[in-house]
Amino acid sequence: MTPTEPASDSALTIRHLVKEYRRGAPVLKDVSLTFASSGVTAIIGPSGTGKSTLIRCINRLVEPTAGEIWFEGENLAALPPARLRRVRRRIGMVFQEYNLVERLSVIENILTGRLGYVAFWRVWLRRFPAEDIARAFALLDAVGLGSDFATRRADQLSGGQRQRVGIARALMQQPRLLLADEPTSSLDPRTSVEIMDLLRALAERERIPIVINIHNVELARRCASRIIGMAQGSIVFDGAPEALDDDRLATIYGGEGWLQ
Amino acid sequence: MGEVSRLLVDYGPAFGQALFLTWKLTVMSFVAGVLLGMAVTVLRLLPVPPLRFVLTGYVEIFRNIPGVVLLIFIVFALPDLDVVIDYEPSVILTLSLVCSAFTADYLRTGINTIPGGQIEAALSLGMRPMRIISAVVLPQAWRAVVQPMTSLLIALMLSTSLASQVPFPGRELTALVSKVATDSAAGMPAFAVAAALYVATGLLIAWAGATLERKVRILR
């Protein structure tokens, strides 16, 4: 059967995705999902259940064992390296540990979002195109840091500030999809809420869908328009935050004692 | 003290030339060795198991053979295989091979200090593997290895003394000490002067390395 492109109103379609790190021990068991072209989707589930693997299969930081991943008319799972790199530029990613270049300034870190686009000599000489620099400063404002932060070194920032830079860098790619892997797990409760609200606001502004792995169920309820619950490599819940009751949570995380 | 000053009157310019030759051998071997070591390191990152095996063998061999033995092999054994290399290039080749093996080893340690997330971040920006290596991995790896590379440079500088084991046309410090000892029986002061010059050079390298380290280090 030749893979066929899904209907065009979905931004991302995953079909029968399987990932095995060891043969016969699948971490993802036949996952199929469709994401609309806007909105925040939170993926919740216990540790080790395949959330990070799922999100990394989408841009193939992790190589899927089987299945299809359709994004903007292309099956990413079957793309050769050069075309995969072109698609990756359009998928922004935000990480738990921020993954900034510590010794570079904030503005340079944001500009690294253009590394997939600009010529090597420009990067080497730190000569980014003027419109990129203007956009970087605009994003610095948009993530709530302001131009005072532009020349600060990344290693002088707090966790919340670093994550804001990480988000600005991802948006610098002008992505059509944003992936976030536990973006708030290293942050305090208040900063976590601020970061999640920021992600949601920016996704609305840029009109792009966001897929977020998250441990904090309350935060997921607050910020997402759709919640996907995973357990042992399969999807056990998929619906609106309101539908996520204690029974469903028990299905996702197992047991009930922790809910009391 | 009188002996040293008499020695410097007789051999002052010779010591100057010997010191210069020691420096020249050091710099040439270091540059060649570092470039070679970096090439080995990058090639070892490629997902080609046979290549990795061969290069690991390369590193282990040249890291574990005494420089003198390697030099004697190149100068006296290779001609049997119809490979004749002049004395000076032989010394530089020997030191470069040893230096490249240590460089490859240190640099790999430097690469291991880079969090895997950075590679993921670079990949998700759509960067090419070679560009990730040259723009993300190597610049940070080099910064992490300034200190061991400084020690390697000092060790390499001291190892230039193995040039005294072959009939080298010019004389570096150790060869000059041997000659002075034979010619004028002024072995002890000659040795003292040479030792002082080695130590001074070593201190200079250590100071330069520490300065560089302060400038480029990444605080984690």
Image (cartoon, helix red, strand yellow):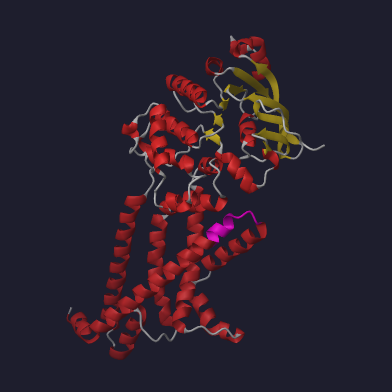
Question: Where residue B169 sits: x, y (%)?
Answer: 39, 87
Residue extending furthest toward the left: B2
- Chain part drawn in magenta: B40-48
Q: Residue furthest right?
A: A1
Task: Kindly indicate the quadrant of the structure image that contains residue B79.
Answer: bottom right
Q: Is residue A5 left or right of residue A157?
A: right
Q: Position of residue B163 (x, y in %)?
A: 42, 79
Q: In this rendered view, identify the residue nearer to me: A6 or B142.
A: A6
Main SS category, magenta section: helix
What count of labels does the image hold?
A: 0
Q: Quadrant of the C terminus of chain B?
A: top left
Q: Which is nearer the eye, B77 or A110?
A: A110
Which residue sits at x=22%, y=84%? B7
Residue B158 visible in the picture: no
Which quadrant is home to the N terminus of chain B?
bottom left
Query: What residue is shown at x 53% (from left), y 70% (from top)?
Result: B65
Location of residue B144 with respect to A96 vertically, above or below: below
- B85 up-or-down from A167: above or below: below
Q: Residue at x 56, y 26 (%)?
A: A210
Q: Is residue B219 left or right of residue A179?
A: left
Q: Is residue B176 visible?
A: yes
Give how far across and how far down residue B133 sits, in percent.
52, 52
Q: Position of residue B32 (x, y in %)?
A: 46, 69
> Within the magenta stretch, is there residue A40?
no
Give the farthest residue toward the bottom.
B183
Q: Nearer the viewer, residue A92 or A18?
A: A92
Q: Is residue A205 left or right of residue B216?
A: right
